[in-house]
Image (spheres, grey):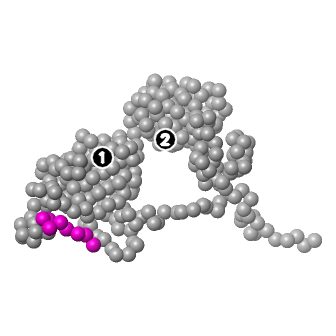
Amino acid sequence: MKTLSPELAAHLAGGTTTLAWCWKLIRRDGAVLGFTEHDRDLSFGGTTYEAAGGFTASALESTGGLNIDNLDVAGALSSARLDEGDLAAGLYDDAEVEIWRVNWADTEQRLLMRKGNLGEVSRSGNAFSAELRGLAHRLNQPVGRLYQYGCDADFGDGRCGLDAGAWTAAATVVSASGNRELVVAGIDGFAAGHFTRGRLVFTNGANEGAAMEVKAHEKGGRIELWRAMAREVEAGDTFEVLAGCDKQFATCGKKFANGENFRGFPHMPGNDFVLASAARK
């Protein structure tokens, strides 16, 4: 149940209202953006809500159970702060969202209608559509360990036990094709495939701070990324790349000498065990 302030309750009971929707987004990098459907900017709580941001939202519907309350937010990439490159780089993935109902004539009269996170974001031309998931969606996430062959630890975390910095190399882009296929300098001493499945993070250039998984690492300093970077990759851009791990027990032991910290179950019985039968003799 939502509690209205006496001032807002009186305003709603007055018959004539001056209400507007406001959306507040907190991105993964900590940047805070505000948008409103009103025809002028509104400010409250230390955030400025930009007018004409191109945002529209589907109807709000809430349930009393544990069902996940979803709605869609759609709009145009018309704001100077809503950059297509940031959207493609994943800065809005799982961003925190607050939806406010505000009296634009007196922004002290406002009510928080919904709080949640952005889900799947899709783009088409200069428009985007995003799913807003209610807080209950956190209860739908897997918790605990998975019983599987592969390791379920993240490379370099506390469960893995390895120092990620010791397995990270710095390199420089020599040339790039399609923002996805790179010829680089600085990793010539590593065997082919050493960085396959690794994580590459740009340290300068237009993609500074953006990360992408390595699809293939070939001899001669050639790297192919799983997806093209959101912004132009140019010669001279620098990055750091983490050694790749395929989460298999053999790799953990031979490549990293870390078999004792392997977080999978390499000896679990598979289909071959289920289908096996005893020999007659």
Assign a secondary structure to mark 1.
strand
Query: Percent from the top left, x then y, of residue 28?
Result: 39, 47
* Amino acid at the residue labelled 1: Val
Q: Which residues are magenta?
A: 1-8
Q: In the rendered view, does 108 fall on the left or right side of 261?
A: left
Q: Nearer the viewer, residue 70 or 49?
A: 49
Q: Position of residue 87 (x, y in %)?
A: 35, 45
Q: Residue at x 6, y 70 (%)?
A: 15
Give the secondary structure at mark 2: strand
Q: What is the CA distance from the residue labelled 1 to the residue labelled 2?
A: 24 Å
Specify the label residue 32 is tagged with. 1
Work out whether residue 72 or residue 22 is closer to the camera in this orientation and state it. Answer: 22
- State yes or no: residue 59 in magenta: no
- Compared with 239, 103 (above or below) is below
Q: Position of residue 153 (x, y in %)?
A: 60, 51
| Residue depth check, mark 1 versus mark 2: number of the one nearer the observer | 1
Mark 2 residue type: Met
Residue at horizontal 26 percent and vertical 59 percent from the top: 99
Residue at coordinates 35% horizontally, 60% vertically from top-left?
116
